[in-house]
Image (cartoon, coloured by chain):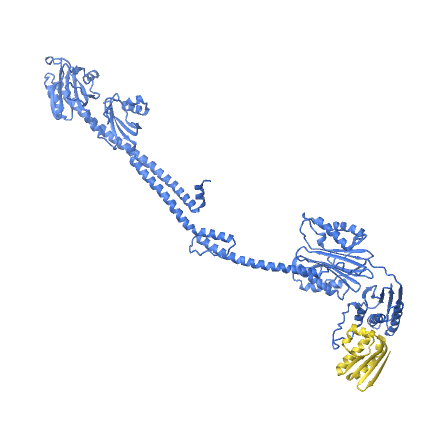
Amino acid sequence: MEVKITTDGKETIAAFIGRLDTLASQEIAPQMNELAEAAGGTIILDCSELAYISSSGLRIFLSLRKAAAEKGGKVIVRNITNDIRNVFMMTGFLNLFEIQ
Amino acid sequence: MNSPFQYIRKSLSRKLSLWIVLFAAVIFNVALGFMFTQSLKAVREEAISRATKELDNTVLRVTSLLDRVEIATNNTDWLVTRHLNTPDSMFVYSRRILQNNPDLNGCSIAFEPYYFRDRGRYFSAYSFNDNGTILTTQEGNDHYEYFYMDWYQTAKLLDRPVWTEPFFDFNPDDIYSKEMIASFCKPLKDNAGEYIGTISVDMSLKWLSETISAVKPYPNSYSIMIGEGGTFFVHPDPQKLLYQTIFTETLAVPDPEVSALGHAMLNGEEGMRELEMDGVDSYVFYKPLGDTGWSVAIVCPESDIFGGYQHLRRIVLFIVIIGLLLMFFVFSRVVTSELKPLMLLADQTDTIAKGSFDQLLPEDKRTDEIGRLNHSFIGMQKSLRKYIDQLQETTATKASIESELKVASTIQVSMLPRIFPPFPERKDIDLYANMKPAKEVGGDLFDFFLRDEKLFFIIGDVSGKGVPAAMLMAVTHSLFRAASAHESDPAIIIRNINETVCPDNSSSMFVTIFLGVLDLPTGHLRYCNAGHDSPLLLNGGVTELKCLPNLPVGILADMKFVTQECDLTYGTTLFLYTDGLNEAMNKDYEQFGMERVTELLKPCAEQEMGPRQVLEHVLDGVRDFVQDAEQSDDLTMLALRYTPGEFATILSERLTLSCDLARVPELNDFIMSIAEKLGMDAPTSAQVQLAVEEAVVNVMNYAYPDGRKGFVTIKAMSDGHELRIVVIDSGTAFDPTKKEKADVTLSFEDRPIGGLGIFLVREIMDSINYERTDNRNILTMIKNIK
């Protein structure tokens, strides 16, 4: 699992590559804390290469969303695959995020 | 029945008046009767005393008259015997008697033939009164040989003074014709005591008759006098005088009473007799006349004596009868008018009887019994009206309650499962249930539902029947659904129900419950019995499921209920019932009984009948027993048959991991390889991976708290149709299926961070099931793959 965080002006882009299972979620926790600091701006979660997400991954997404809401920023989920979209659908996440 | 009787019977006033009048009549009758009798006696006594007195008077007067004649005769007699030597003086003496007694008719001083030689054969100095002039003559001659006459001979022969029977004076010169005479004749004797002649003094009987006839104590009374032979010589009927005796008429028509009277009079008796004289009822008073041998009688017609009395009596009776009739009439009228309000009452009662309560009886100001009745009646009318109103209200209320009861009944029935078979898609379980309420709404309940791979079922019986029972039943039913939504332990579910029911149970009702949770994959049955009848197991034979009695729900809030367990084998039928079955009663109040239930179920067990047939068979049996008797209690039955399918395993793999999140990728690889082997498509595979990861991570996170080391085993099996994944651990008892379903519709602010794991498992898998057996948590997840 790998997360590439790049900053482009006001936008912070986090690209998830690989499987975001429970273990991976733990592993990327520090990076996510980092990312949360940028929650004042726009965070783009690029999921084009995210193959899998577990509930712990969803939890990370939700935490970011809550942090952004606190700091006045916003979270955009971009390029989700069908599998991930299914999970989002089941959990109601499609309504919580701006999906691009 | 004749009509006058009915006429009187119909009217109280007539009846009452009739009674009063009858009673008065009786009293009058007695009083008047007594008075009449006494008066009659008095009148009679008075009459007797009066007539007797009159008779005595008459006799006295007649006697004194006769005495005068006798005295006059005696006085002259003495002179005659002193002066026998001067025959002519006889004329003087004879004349003197008449002069001294002007009311005498005549006087003869007659001597034996040739007594005075010089005077020839006849010498009788005779003086007679010719209308106040006294004439004196010598009486005897060849035509009238006086010494052969009765008056002369009788005195001579009897040698004592004697009164002759009256006779018509025979006189050749016809001077005294029709003059009836009685003579006092006394023999004359010379100094030597030789009979020399007879002195005779004539007395006109007319005079005697007048004296006697003057006695008239009653207007129609009359006097009679009879001589020694019974000849009448005083009688009002001149025809009878001298020609008839008192016995004459008895010769033609025998009349013993008159004969007796005649004899009594002739015998010189004195007295009174009641008899019929000449066809008239009369009182006859009789008395002899001195020594004459004559008898005087006064005949008083009864009608004269009692005439006044009879008249009085007629008037009094007339007054009484008129009075009684008047009394009847007046009473009748008075009572009728007094009872008039009663007629009104009767009319009103008829009106009420016809169903009209609106009209009130007019108020009566009377204070007597009828007035009171009137008041009471008005009071009754008012109350009746009030009660009728209330009754109508109550009836309406009742009708509305009844319709509401019907609704309640419908709701109650709709709350219970009513689609059978309930799980047509499942081959491992068949279930049928039936409830027959005894009243509109029942106090029995049954319910069942599938949660995950578990069948929850309940049967219960609320104490009592009707609406309160049904309400408690509905509450229990809801509580069962609520408590078993996230709880699979029957004892805990019942405990929850009990804790909720107890505090609110003011009416001290209770529910007996049998609650079972059947784990369908394993056939493991957990059950808890709260005072209910033990279910029966049909498995070739009929046996009773061993149950602890426990207490019914609703009695003790802190009651500890105990869960029991057993395993159902293939084809076993569990038969649950309420006491409406074994206590069903026939007309003779005989209970159906457990023996009959068992007997009925035996063939079901032998023939391996399905639940529906079992219930129908039992119902038929009960119906045959009960016949027409009214159903005494709710009757509820539930039968479930467990027939788990054979699982033809084509794949079976297992993986045991230590509880370390670092092992999660291994798990994912394991599932992915299985998915590949089963040829599952990529999205399904990904979903199953997600579900299994969530389940396993759940175990890793929570099963072994306090840093204990533990393992989790994942078994994967498939028969080609479904994929079964079983997650087993030996950690703390934890039932993830109890977790509440996450609400995915909440906004992100309200969404909790966690809680999605089990939710995803449920979403992805077709069925999940938790079991805790042998201190292991066993979570079975099934995904249909084809």
User: Viewer-proximal residue, B292 or B333?
Assistant: B333
Q: On screen, B156 above or below B571?
A: above
User: Viewer-proximal residue, B463 or B107?
Assistant: B463
Furthest residue toward bottom: A9
| Image coords of residue B764 (percent x, y) | 81, 69
Q: Quadrant of residue B648?
A: bottom right
Q: Relative to residue B625, is residue B687 drawn left or right?
A: right
Tell me how many marks there are: 0
Q: On screen, B697 above or below B585?
A: below
In this view of the protein, can residue A11 be seen by the observer?
Answer: yes
Q: Which quadrant of the figure contains the C terminus of chain B?
A: bottom right
| Image coords of residue B235 (percent x, y) | 24, 26
Q: Relative to residue B439, is residue B316 drawn left or right?
A: left
Which lettered chain is shown in yellow? A
| Image coords of residue B478 (percent x, y) | 71, 63
Chain B on-screen colour: blue
In this view of the protein, can residue B498 be seen by the observer?
Answer: no
| Image coords of residue B437 (percent x, y) | 68, 56
Q: Relative to residue B630, is residue B225 drawn left or right?
A: left
User: Viewer-proximal residue, B428 or B566?
Assistant: B428
Q: Quadrant of residue B106?
A: top left
Q: Relative to residue B188, is residue B338 drawn left or right?
A: right
